[in-house]
Amino acid sequence: MKKILIPTDFSPAARNAALYAVELAKSMQCELLLYHAYVIQVAPATEVPWVIVPDLTDIENDKKMRMEKEIAFLSVQNNTVKITSLITVGVPVDEILNLEKAEKVSYIVMGMKKSGALREFIVGSVATQVIRKSEVPVIVVPEDYSFKKIIKIAFASDYNIETDTSILQPLKDFSEYFNSQLLILNVTEKKEENLQFEKAAVEIKMDHYFEEVEHTFHFSEDSDLMHGLNEFIKQHQIDMVVTVSHQHNLLERIFRKNNNKKIAFHTPIPLLTIPDTHKKMSAYFV
């Protein structure tokens, strides 16, 4: 049985993501692992040559109590999904990635708190760091989003000619699990006549790969790529947006021009990121 890992810091955003994961697990027949990692904070004492070490037993008991409350809350929401829990001491990102391998999880579901500056969005959260390093798909759920059936999925692609479609299996799986419509979107800043042949070749490859999934191709010209996707989500009432996680992606290239620019797009819906294990397909937003 597939397993979904749900890292939590016991915040409202994390709880909301856990609720979303419960609903996913019901449809996808997965079990859930609720996980919390924490670092022992050692405070330096003043005017004395030693440090103050907190009561580790109290900390451990507090974490266990909070985890039990979370499990109890989630259990009330369902009576069909198996939920287990684990707490460890360590740097959250490192511990999550280690657990991902040890437990052979299929997906990671995390909450995303609202963020202002782009810099905070890219590197200032555990979720975005996990996206960059995870070898399994990661689903990021906005803290104010409530689960609803995934009727329409938008896949934001840059139509890279070297795309290896096999890495898109998680996207195909989601489309088939929920019988979703797949809208494959390419947003460009301006028309690129010299790339039409390459884009046609990629479209043929994806058309063949998704032949068993109801899918359509869409193109949008927008000087602000973030704005273009956001408008597409609103116009087509998209329920999930999908990208491929890649180290050097268009988001970084755009904002290198203006590091102080506020984030232009903050996805209002869940974001599924697929790890680019082949390092050949770039994506827009991770």
Image: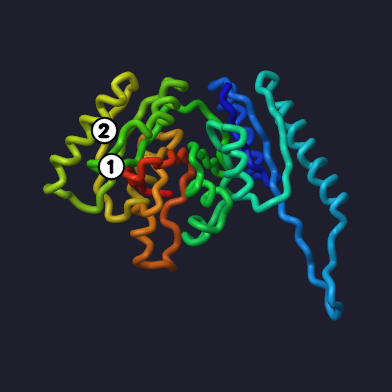
The reply to whether callout 2 and callout 1 are in contact (CB within 8 Å) is yes
Q: Is residue 252 left or right of residue 92?
A: left
Q: Residue at x 76, y 57 (%)?
A: 40
Which residue is labeled 2 in the image?
A: 217
Q: Quadrant of residue 24?
A: top right
Q: Is residue 11 left or right of residue 257?
A: right
As drawn, the label of residue 10 is none
Secondary structure of the residue carrying numbered label 2? strand
Q: Quadrant of residue 181?
A: top left
Secondary structure of the residue carrying numbered label 1? strand
Of 192 and 86, which appears nearest the observer? 86
Of 226 and 175, which appears nearest the observer? 175
User: What type is the residue that disc 1 sits on?
Assistant: Asn
Q: Residue at x 72, y 55 (%)?
A: 39
Task: Establish if 260 lies above or below 18.
Answer: below
Mark 2 vs mark 1, CA separation in Å? 8 Å
Q: Where in the figure is residue 150, as x and y percent of width and height?
A: 47, 28
Q: Residue at x 40, y 52 (%)?
A: 247
Q: Where in the figure is residue 91, as x and y percent of width and height?
A: 65, 53
Q: Is residue 284 left or right of residue 204?
A: right
Q: Where in the figure is residue 79, as x and y percent of width and height?
A: 70, 20
Of 131 and 240, which appears nearest the observer? 131
Which residue is labeled 1 in the image?
A: 186
Q: Is residue 272 left or right of residue 225?
A: right
Q: Residue at x 78, y 37 (%)?
A: 69
Q: Where in the figure is residue 8, as x and y percent of width and height?
A: 66, 43
Callout 2 crowding tier (Cα within 10 Å): few <14, some 14–19, many ≥20: some
Which quarter of the figure is the N terminus placed in?
top right
User: What type is the residue that disc 2 sits on?
Assistant: Phe
User: Please, which residue is most extreme toward the front here?
Assistant: 102
Of 65 and 46, which appears nearest the observer? 46
